[in-house]
Image: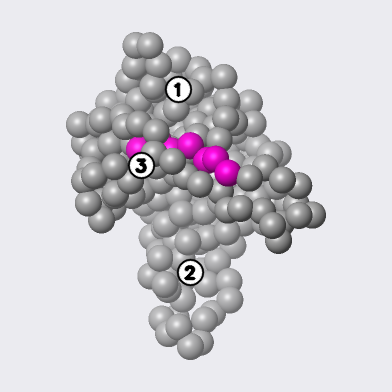
């Protein structure tokens, strides 16, 4: 913890580009720290003699407010999401700011997470508005889905989002204690999980959540959920 190079205060998100650069949202220090991975590139068969990768500090990007998430989009660059400022920042020359606080398409209320599709469309968990927004190039609001509630396709403070290689959208419906799945057009497909009855590390309840806040999908379409209050 700290304010120096390579130190953090409440880091919120991490992404990487194709060149081996790692970007970390150093939220309460109001900055993005960039690192570069170096080290041995020997084949996996010689792993016993392979030196571990070295992560070298590269540079900083300053922000005015805490950062809630970030993602690197190939051929577009780095996007930074600010919950406090309710906007999306694209790092470019010059930097581009999309959105403001509100309820209209392209506006946000305490957005907490974003993800990118294989074709470069951004999906944003617009947490305070209980919806998901899809944003295209140049910040164009494509469409949105969801509203406050407990029924299928409705949300209660969604705080995490991920998109698979097949353009399936997974949403951590945080206060409804479940994960919902949608197709690329925002059509509800299915959901899984419900609220845990107990919170004891000794007796974990499979398939139940207590405040899921983040998630990821791997190349085999396996879903990993950060089940926050179940630790």
* Cα distance between the residues tagged 2 and 1: 31 Å
> Reading the chain from its start, which is encountered first: label 2 or label 3?
3
Distance between the alpha carbons at the discs numbered 2 and 3: 26 Å
Where residue 141 sits in the image (x, y, percent)?
45, 22
Give the vertical position of 47 relative to 65 (above or below): below
Residue extending farthest bottom:
202
What secondary structure is found at the residue carrying circle 3? strand
Residue 54, visible in the rendered structure: yes
Give the labeled residue for mark 1: 141
Q: Position of residue 174 (x, y in %)?
A: 41, 58
Image coordinates of residue 196 in percent, x first then y, are 46, 76
What is the span of residues highlighted in magenta in the rendered image? Answer: 33-39
Which quadrant: the C terminus?
bottom left
Residue drawn where x is 76% and y is 54% of the image:
46
Residue position marked by numbered label 3 in the rendering: 25
Q: Residues within 10 Å of mark 3 (few under 14, many from 20)?
A: many
Callout 1: helix, strand or loop? Answer: strand
Q: Are marks 2 and 3 in contact (CB under 8 Å)?
A: no
Quadrant holding the N terminus: bottom left
Residue density around tag 1, few if under 14, some if 14–19, many if 20 or more, within 10 Å: some
Q: SS of the residue at dot 2?
A: strand
Q: Is residue 90 left or right of residue 128?
A: right
Q: CA distance from mark 3 to mark 1?
A: 24 Å
Q: Nearer the viewer, mark 3 or mark 1?
A: 3
**Which residue lies under the disc numbered 2?**
209
């Amino acid at each position: 913890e700290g304010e120096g190079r390579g130190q953090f205060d409440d880091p919120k998100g991490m992404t990487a580009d194709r060149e081996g650069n790692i970007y970390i949202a150093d939220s309460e220090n109001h900055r993005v720290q960039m690192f570069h991975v170096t080290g041995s590139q020997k084949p996996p068969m010689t792993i016993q003699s392979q030196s571990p990768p070295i992560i070298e500090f590269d540079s900083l990007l300053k922000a005015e407010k805490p950062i809630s998430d970030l993602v690197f989009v190939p051929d577009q660059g780095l996007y930074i999401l600010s919950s406090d400022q309710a906007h999306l920042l694209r790092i470019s020359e010059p930097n581009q700011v999309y959105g403001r606080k509100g309820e209209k398409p392209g506006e946000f209320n305490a957005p907490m997470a974003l993800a990118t599709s294989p074709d470069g469309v951004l999906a944003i968990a617009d947490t305070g508005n209980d919806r998901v927004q899809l944003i295209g190039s140049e910040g164009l609001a494509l469409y949105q889905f969801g509203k406050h509630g407990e029924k299928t396709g409705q949300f209660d403070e969604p705080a995490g989002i991920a998109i698979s290689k097949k353009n399936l959208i997974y949403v951590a419906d945080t206060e409804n204690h479940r994960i919902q799945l949608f197709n690329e057009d925002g059509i509800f497909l299915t959901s899984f999980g419900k609220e845990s009855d107990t919170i004891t590390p000794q007796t974990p309840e499979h398939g139940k959540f207590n405040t899921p806040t983040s998630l990821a999908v791997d190349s085999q379409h396996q879903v990993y959920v950060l089940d926050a209050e179940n630790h």
